Image (cartoon, helix red, strand yellow):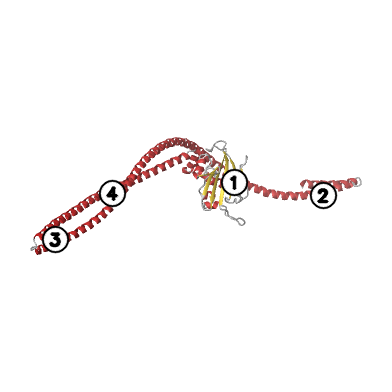
Amino acid sequence: MRLRSLRVHGFKSFADATDVQFHDGVTAIVGPNGCGKSNISDAIRWVLGEQRPTAIRGAKMEEAIFQGSVNRRPVNRGSVSMTVTNEDGALPVPFEEVEIGRIVYRDGGSDYSINRSHVRLKDVVDLTRDTGLGAGANVIENRMIDSILSDRADERRSLFEEAAGIGKYKDRRKAALRRLERAENDLQRLEDVIAEVRSKVRSLARQKGRAERYLALRDRRLDVEVAVVRHQLDTLGRRLAEVTRALEGEVPESQGHLAEVQAAEAEYEALRLRQVDAQRDRGAAAARLDELRTALVRWERDLAVAEERAAYARRRLGQIAEERAGAHQRVGDLDVETATLREDAAAVQEEIDSFAGEMEERRAHAASVRERLEEVRAEVEAVEGRERQVARRGAQLEGDAEGSDAQAAELERRLERLTRELEEASDALTDLASQGDLFSGRLDELQRETTAA
């Protein structure tokens, strides 16, 4: 797997669409300060799903979009697409080249794509997990090197887990535990709902029994009142008939019976009014009965809904039980994988311990080298001091040498002059034989001066 190309448009300082081709042999990107070298590494980290603005040197994700300059207007979105080769099959997709893209908008929205097909962030993370291409593993910064070399085990563990390829299984185990916890919470809520529905069903059953008893007693009361009124009406009718026959047979006694008839009529009128009141009460009772029947229908409907909810809750409980069994089975599988990973972690820990021992030896060697370096630095300082003294002495000797050169030049000039004089004297030697001894002494004296110089 190798990085093939990177296309950046509207991301940070790349206002225009920029294609960066990574040919064979490209090992570094160089340039002056402020040319955008760090923005390329930020673009690679960002397109692979980085969610922390501080990781790409920003306070919020909208700052990743080109903010504009003196001569350029800001853009509304930033996009990065990265193409990598997949000849070795490191990525779990049937393509020899994979293009991963990401777009961010001013409103905070973000889109991801794999081979120009819209996907989720989880799909990008799952694609690059355990391949060394993740957002947290593809770019190593100075602070990450400090984390690797630090003494804190928790800071090194995440990097070793990513390198060992067990981070994916830990994430799966965490996801399974979260689903199991959600299932437990759903089960608890369903049990609460079932308990509440059962209490409502019991309350509705009690209310239904009371309503039925009330309706039965109300009907019996109405029937009794109607029967009493009918009996009274029949009795009064018979008495009225008897009075009528007595009036027809006994006219002299009509005055006494007339008073009795009037009393009977008054009583009849009172009974008729009572009958009207009874009928009105019966109508009110019928209306009340209708209301109770309506309420009973509503209660029966609520009872049916409650029973349906209880049935759904029972079915949901069965599903949750099946999901719990499956989750327990997955947890068992994950425990087996965890045991395997722990064995791998133990092997890795042994390697870490060996590395730690070697690191301690190297630290001791580094300490001895530092001590030797201090001694060498002291010796170098002493040598530098002697070198400065030698330099001063050399400068002094150079001055003396220049003076000696001047004296030598002067002596050469004198020697040349004396040579000419010697030649002249040689020519005149025959004539100056008497002066030869004096000249020879003078010549010896000059030669001694030349030797001394």
Instruction: Compare marks 1 and 3 and give the one earlier in the sequence.
Output: 1
**Amino acid, disc 3:** Ala
Q: CA distance from mark 2 to mark 3?
A: 188 Å
Residue at image mark 2: 413
Query: Is 117 situated above or below 72?
Result: above
Compared across the picture, whether 420 is left or right of 182 comes to: right
2 vs 322, left or right, is right
Mark 2 residue type? Arg
Residue that mark 4 sits on: 204
**Residue 249 location in percent, x, y?**
9, 59
Asked if the residue at tag 3 contacts the one at tag 2, i.e. Cβ–Cβ closer than 8 Å, the answer is: no
The circle on residue 7 is 1
Q: Are marks 3 and 4 in contact (CB under 8 Å)?
A: no
State whether residue 9 appears in this view. yes
The percent position of residue 420, horizontal first and vertical second, equals 86, 48
Q: Amino acid at mark 1?
A: Arg
Marks 1 and 2, how far apart in space? 82 Å
Foreground label between 1 and 3:
3
Name which of mark 2 and mark 4 comes first in the sequence: 4
Which element is circle 3 on? Answer: helix
- Could you say which disc has been placed on residue 264 in the image? 3
Q: Compare marks 1 and 2 and give the one earlier in the sequence.
A: 1
- Give the vertical position of 69 relative to 94 (above or below): below
